Amino acid sequence: MIKAIIFDLNGVFLKSEYLTKRIEEKFNIPSDESLTVLKESLKETRLNPKVKIFKYWRDLFEKYKINITESEFLLFWFSGESLVNDFVLLSQELRERGLEVYIFSNNFKERTEYYRENFKEIFDNVNGAFFSWETGYVKSDPEAYTNLLNLIKVKPEEVIYFDDSKENIELAKSIGIKGYVYIDFETTKDILVKNSI
């Protein structure tokens, strides 16, 4: 019997254009350069809240003689994201039917704080939200899933998990979680119906 539905956050509850594309359009910095910085910055900041992500970006902006502060850059990044209200309503509906709903995200401290401040409706309508910088595990680590199950006190077979990363879904499946690669809202609803939810 399914007791909990777990959703990725970005690409599901929140949508946005690629940051690298937005940086290229606004600052004329090639996407491949900003993508390199993005990947490098996330490796550490997803797990270490003491590290400020802007330290990785400062050199890139200086290289292109762009004067931008940390707060200006973070606002530029995070304000490019918008709420998918259908998922807030779905979460409300699932919880009204007695299911638990959780967010499971590989996100760093500054972004999480922005979300909690600016997208309160997400956090008001889930049972809990788990971020890698708080749990100490990223989703590429199988321990991330067993740790999450322990935190929410459910068995793998009692969970359905949606994530836009096939690799994350395969890892979740490897420990017995019923996982699905997220495609879109309607497909998600169809999958829930097929699982008698």
Image (spheres, rainbow, N blue to C red):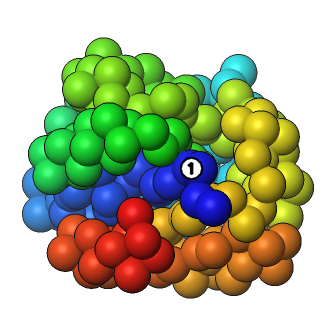
Q: Residue visible at 21% across and 57% down? A: 16
Q: In the figure, is residue 140 to the left or right of 117?
A: right
**Could you say which is closer to the camera, residue 142 or residue 43?**
142
Which one is nearer the viewer's eye here, 165 or 1?
A: 1
Quadrant in which the N terminus appears: bottom right
Label 1 belongs to which residue? 4
Looking at the image, residue 176 sits to the left or right of residue 197; the answer is: right
Q: What type is the residue that disc 1 sits on?
A: Ala
195 or 58, which lies in front?
195
Q: Where residue 97 sits: x, y (%)?
A: 36, 43
Residue at position x 46%, y 75% in the image: 195
Q: Which residue is nearer to you in this view: 94 or 82?
A: 94
Is residue 122 shown above or below 97?
above
Q: Is residue 149 visible?
A: yes
Q: Residue furthest top?
A: 117
Image point 67% across, 41% down: which residue?
A: 132
Q: Residue visible at 26% across and 44% down?
A: 93
Q: Is residue 23 left or right of residue 104?
A: left
